[in-house]
Amino acid sequence: MRRLLITGGAGFIGANFVHHWLQHYPDDRVVVLDALTYAGNVRNLEQIRQRAELRFVQGDIADTPLVESLLRDERLDTLVHFAAESHVDRSIHGPDAFVQTNIIGTHSLLKAARKVWLEEKLVERHRFHHVSTDEVYGSLSAADPAFTETTPYAPNSPYSASKAASDHLVRAYHHTYNLNVTTSNCSNNYGPFHFPEKLIPLIIVNILQGKPLPIYGDGKNVRDWLHVSDHCRGIELVINKGVPGEVYNIGGGAEAENIHLVKTLCHVVDELFASESTLKQRFPDAPAVHGPPSSSLLTYVKDRPGHDRRYAIDCSKIESELGYRAQVTLESGLRNTVQWYLANENWWRAVMDGSYRQWLARQY
């Protein structure tokens, strides 16, 4: 039985991982540590919040004494580190928060793990798994081969630079102190609980509200898309079978231009509105109610500064060594994601209109 500390476990990927882990390892102890900043939402854990195996703690990963006490008091042996500032646009306008959380916060966790696991030797075995991003590798041209684990780092935004720094700290703690670490670098995630400032959920909710669908530049920037459930499976494999000190790239094998992705989402929404009459009543501002296709909302806007042209992940290492395979196709994953947002209107409206903040204030 493992005893896990999951940082950022009320965020998008972290919450999906908490659900995944407790579904597959129902007897394990899981402690979630989350500061509940704008993208953290305890409602993401609502379905499992009352389980005896789960404890939620609101707190900052940069609070080293708090992290030490959790590791010590709960006798935790596995730390899965999701907590991060992750939105590139926000990092361009306010990089300080990214340095604080992604670099200082990660170092705080490493210090606490070193003290409790290595100096105090509180548990017999331990694992510190660090969740990172393909953005640390920089940008690819159309002809370049996909990123591998040996691709030199070349971060181009304050966000990716802060994640690159955290990756190096994790590596250093393994080589200097022999902390048992692994790192995974993932491609763009999507799926349930995704905060509606990121591309896919933003497009979905904007279509439903009849708002413009912003497309940076010419819309031909390419990303490899990874359904969050496949990401969770990949991390599970790394935790269970990964070699300490190693890095594993986790991707979806689904490269797509942003404009193609957005048009696909438009098509999916239009199909669903045509087949489900109740949707027109629920979302009267959606284009499908009045006749034009959702793609009529496409709006090209000024490109993001330093916008990386293409990301692509080579998954051959985790596939050959750990048996990973992405199971969710982009087509089915996008359709399932649209259906999740249609079924969870109260969730995304609360996040976007501020009532969640009011609810949160009553809880803590």
Image (cartoon, grey):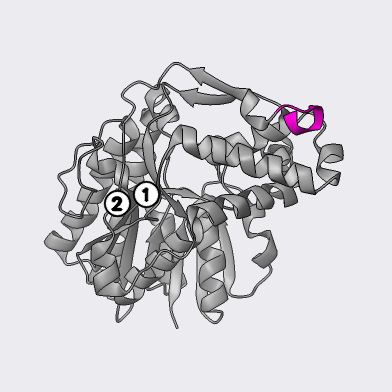
Could you say where residue 24 lies in the image, as x and y percent from the top left? Answer: 52, 77
Residue 294 seen from this side: yes
* Discs 2, 1 touching: Cβ within 8 Å: yes
Q: Secondary structure at mark 1?
A: loop
Looking at the rendering, the stretch of residues picked out in magenta corresponds to 287-292
Q: Quadrant of residue 51?
A: bottom right
Percent of width and height locating residue 209: 72, 30
Q: Is residue 364 visible?
A: no
Q: Which residue is mark 1?
A: 187
Numbered label tally: 2
**Amino acid at pointer 2:** Ile
Residue at image point 54% right, 36% down:
262
**On screen, residue 336 above or below 120:** above
Q: Which amino acid, mark 1? A: Ser
Q: How much space separates mark 2 and mark 1, taking CA atoms?
A: 7 Å
Relative depth, front residue between 265 and 89? 265
Q: Residue furthest left?
A: 176
Provide residue 129's location: percent of width, then percent of height.
33, 63
From what the image shows, is residue 80 above or below residue 273? below
Image point (31%, 70%), residue name: 127
Residue 329 left/right relative to 92:
right
Expressed as whole percent of the image width and height from the top left, the position of residue 193 reads 60, 50
Q: What residue is drawn where x is 52% and y is 47%? A: 35
Query: The N terminus lies in which quarter of the figure?
Result: bottom left
Q: Which mark is residue 313?
A: 2
Q: Main secondary structure of the magenta part?
A: helix
Which type of secondary structure does the marked residue at label 2 adopt? loop
For this rendering, which residue is in front, 208 or 177? 208
Marker disc for residue 131: none
Query: Within 10 angstroms of label 1, few (less than 14), some, or many (20 or more) residues?
Result: many
